Image (cartoon, coloured by chain):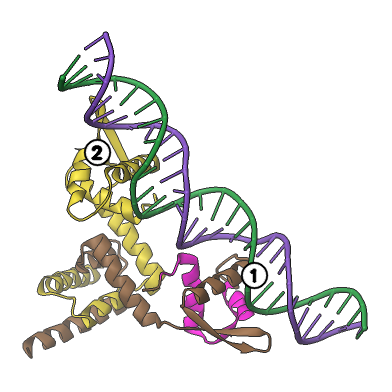
Chain colours: A yellow, B brown, C purple, D green
DNA sequence: TTAAATGTATTACAGGTGTAATCCATAAGG
DNA sequence: CCTTATGGATTACACCTGTAATACATTTAA
């Protein structure tokens, strides 16, 4: 799988939200959180294109960039490999960590219950 | 927090399991999974000491290394920052990814139910 | 028509990382 | 005692990353 660095990820996240965008649009969108020089963002865009994470169409002499990989796919793959690396593949201990730090909210719990219900349904019908 | 690279993490994991260990013990323990030269492992041990992740006592002219940070602490911090970065701070979608790939087992589900029960208990008694 | 601005492409450069090899001191063997 | 082996310390080196600056080709404004 394509390796995306931390700084690059921020750029991807902008384009996962709205797409396609010109380099300047991306710079503007990042302006809020990141204190990056325009040139820095352009470098990141370039690297992402080189890595095959972004594609672009030409709009006059500017480029319009768009993701070549889906955020969901990226999240899935990263989630799996992270949990593998840090938690020996078991996801529950990670959730336990969140619980212990009071980082679970009602929405999370609701979603987790739903997932568990579906899992059990799945089991039964095997 | 101390930054631990991927290769370094494997060394830490050996020492989180058994501690303290000589460099050679660590090399031996890693021998199974990793195809690393002895010198490579020594380099990693050195870097971890420099970073303050490992300490050591002298045993003759050899060193006995031990972790200076707890695995749990490391897992907590990494879990938080990973979920923040990739999942905007929400842990449930990560679990959903596992579920969708059939990576949840009965143990996980059991633990998750337990966590949810505790969370609800917690809520009630507020 | 010529100079300035603007977009992308190329280059820069220090610090981290993977992956060792070499150096150096000393302990151990002959 | 002298040589060799062995442990840690130092050095190596290419690639990735963060963070730009510079170069180059055009478009556009004057």
Q: Would you say B51 lies left or right of B112 here?
A: right
Q: CA distance from mark 2 to mark 1?
A: 47 Å
Q: Secondary structure beneath disc 2?
A: helix
| Residue A114 coordinates in the image, percent (x, y) | 14, 70
Q: Residue at x 27, y 48 (%)?
A: A11
Q: Would you say B68 lies left or right of D26 here?
A: right
User: From the image, which quarter does the N terminus of chain B lie in?
Assistant: bottom left
- Residue numbers of the magenta segment: B3-30
Report the front residue among B117 and A70.
A70
Residue B20 colored magenta?
yes
Q: Residue at x 51, y 74 (%)?
A: B50
| Residue A76 quadrant | bottom left
Residue at the spot of label 2? A23
| Residue C23 coordinates in the image, percent (x, y) | 73, 66
Residue at the spot of label 1? B38
| Residue A20 visible to the viewer | no
| Residue B25 quadrant | bottom right
């Amino acid at each position: 799988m394509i390796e995306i660095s931390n700084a690059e990820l921020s750029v991807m996240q902008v384009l996962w939200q709205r797409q396609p965008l010109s380099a300047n649009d991306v710079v503007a969108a990042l302006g809020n959180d990141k204190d990056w020089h325009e040139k820095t963002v352009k470098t990141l865009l370039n690297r992402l294109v080189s890595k095959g994470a972004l594609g672009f169409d030409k709009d006059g002499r500017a480029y319009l960039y768009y993701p070549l990989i889906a955020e969901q796919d990226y999240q899935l793959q990263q989630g799996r490999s992270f949990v593998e690396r840090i938690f020996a593949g078991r996801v529950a201990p990670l959730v336990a960590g969140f619980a212990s730090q009071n980082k679970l909210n009602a929405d999370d719990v609701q979603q987790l219950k739903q997932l568990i219900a579906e899992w059990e349904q799945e089991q039964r019908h095997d």
